[in-house]
Image (spheres, rainbow, N blue to C red):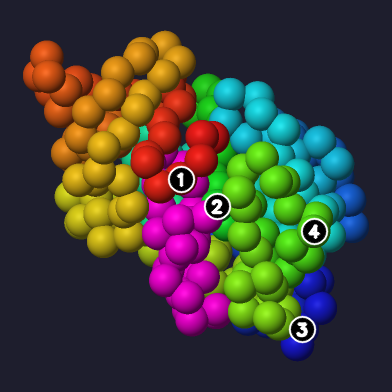
Amino acid sequence: MEALTSTAIQRGLSTRRFGRPVIVHESVRSTNDEAGALAQQGASEGTTVIARIQTTGRGRRGRAWLSPAGGLWLSVVLRPKVALEQWPLVGLAASAGAADAVREVALLQARVKWPNDLLVEDRKLGGVLIETSGTVAIAGIGINANVPPGALDAQTGGISLLGRLGHSVDLAALACAVLGRFEEHYDLLHSDPDALLARWRKHDATLGRQVRVWGAQELEGVAEDVDDRGALLVRTPEGLRRVVAGDVSLRTAETPAE
C-alpha cells in the first residue's frame, strides 16, 4: 500500500491536468485555503493540495468538518470556461467523480445526496465544498477513508471506508482515482453538460424521495430532478419549486440533517 506522498500520487495519475502538480502537506488549516492562495499566485488549473490532517476543515455554510488523520482531504484549483450560471454543476461533477472513485478503489456503491454529500448505505462518507472567487473555483473533496469509526463526527451519522470494509484502503490510489474521475466529469461539464447530469443522476440518492428543505427557503415535497444549472426541483402541494445549492440545507427521511 503506497504512502500518501506526491511521488506516489504522480506515479499513479492518468490525468492530463488534475494533480499536476500535487502538493501534499502533513497538516494545514484548510486545503481549500491553501489552494485558493496558490490560485491567487497564478496556479494552473488542476493544481491540487492534499493534507493528511486539516485542523479547521469546513463544509457548506461554514460548518466545521472534522478532518483527522486517515481521511482523504484534497482541493483542486479550477478555472471553469462555462457560463457563470453553470458553475454549480462543478459540484455535481466533483461528487459524481468521487462516487466513481470510491466504487473503483473500495468496491462499494457510493451515492450522492444533493447538493454535496457522498453516501454509503445512506450514511455520510464525505462531501464536496466549492468556493469561488472571480474566475477561479476551488473544489474541496473530503472522504472519511481510513478514519477510525470512533474519530468520526457522531452528529453527521458518518461512516468511513475503514469502518465499513474492516481494513484500510490505499490513500494514494484513492487520490488518483478521485482526481481521474473528477477530471473526466469536469471535462463533460465543458463538452456535454447533459451527459454530466445523466451520470450524476446514476449516483443520485435524492430524486424521487420526500425531502425537507430549510434555510433561505423552507418547504417539503418530492425531489423530482435537477435542472441544467444544478438546482434541485421539488414538487410541493403549491407546485414545482426550484432550490438553489448554497441557499438551503436538505434532509431526506433516511439521512441526517447536514
- Cα–Cα gap, marks 1 and 4: 20 Å
Q: Amino acid at mark 1?
A: Thr
Question: Which residue is drawn at the image coordinates 79% and 72% (left, top)?
Answer: 4
Say left or right for 197 vs 118. Answer: left
Q: Quadrant of the N terminus?
A: bottom right
Question: Which residue is drawn at the image coordinates 57% and 31% (left, top)?
Answer: 60
Q: Amino acid at mark 4?
A: Gly
- Cα–Cα gap, marks 3 and 1: 34 Å
| Mark with earlier residue (3, 2) | 3
Residue 53 drawn above or below residue 31: below
Residue that numbered label 1 is attached to:
255
Residue 166 drawn above or below residue 208: below
Question: Which residue is drawn at the image coordinates 81% and 36% (left, top)?
Answer: 56
Residue 105 drawn above or below residue 254: below
Magenta range: 98-123
Mark 1 packing: few (<14 Cα in 10 Å), some, or many (20+)? some
Mark nearer the viewer, 4 or 3: 4
- Cα–Cα gap, marks 3 and 2: 26 Å
Q: Amino acid at mark 3?
A: Glu
Kindly identify which numbered label has been placed on residue 124. 2
Q: Amino acid at mark 2?
A: Lys
Kindly identify which numbered label has been placed on residue 2. 3
SS under mark 1? loop
SS under mark 4? helix
Q: Nearer the viewer, residue 4 or 166?
A: 166
Q: Position of residue 191 (x, y in %)?
A: 25, 53
Dots 1, 4 in contact, CB < 8 A: no
